[in-house]
Image: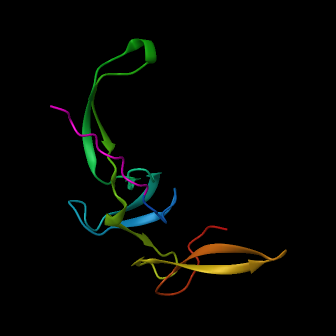
Amino acid sequence: MAIAKRKPAEPVRIDLKKEDTVKVITGRDKGKEGRVLAVDRETGKVLVEHVSMIKRHTRPNPGKQIKGGIAERESPINASNVLIVCPGCHKAVRIAHHIDNIAGGKTRRTRVCRKCGQTLDKK
């Protein structure tokens, strides 16, 4: 009997970036805020600081200077379970995009807060 192979999921468009402050809106860590440590666009997951902590049992490896024991670390959560926190209104908001015209006839797309209109990009 042949086993059917799964097609890999299409990459999800995620508007979050590393170092963004986000708030968890659902799940066991609902209400927590943290910094985005990593974004995986292939699986649609984000790694948020101090959110979704798991215990990892590690074996000691003296060759790599790894001490054994039980270590706590973050596990990825779905990007749909978090909202970005606006630096202007300090609320969890959805992201809108504004297209700005810059010199030379070029355009730049910036992320903005849907509530107060402040830009969410650091530049």
Image vertical order of residue 48 relative to residue 67, above or below? below
Q: Which residues are magenta?
A: 1-11
Queried whether the magenta region covers residue 5, the answer comes back as yes
| Image coords of residue 5 (percent x, y) | 28, 40
| Image coords of residue 32 (percent x, y) | 31, 64
Which residue is at a point 38% across and 51% down the rendered structure image?
43
Q: Where on the picture, by quarter, is residue 60?
A: top left
In this view, the residue in front, 7 or 89, is 7
Indicate how the structure is coloured in the image: rainbow
Image vertical order of residue 63 relative to residue 22, above or below? above
Which residue is at a point 60% across and 81% down the rendered structure image?
98
Residue found farthest to the top: 63
Quadrant location of the C terminus?
bottom right
Image vertical order of residue 29 relative to residue 95, above or below? above
Which residue is at a point 55% across and 85% down the rendered structure image?
117
| Image coords of residue 82 (percent x, y) | 35, 66
> As drawn, is 5 to the left or to the right of 89?
left
In this view, the residue in front, 4 or 89, is 4
Queried whether the magenta region covers residue 3, the answer comes back as yes
| Image coords of residue 69 (percent x, y) | 26, 26
> As drawn, is 105 to the left or to the right of 74?
right
Residue found farthest to the left: 1
Report the number of discs: 0
Which residue is at a point 29% across and 44% down the rendered structure image?
6
Quadrant location of the N terminus?
top left
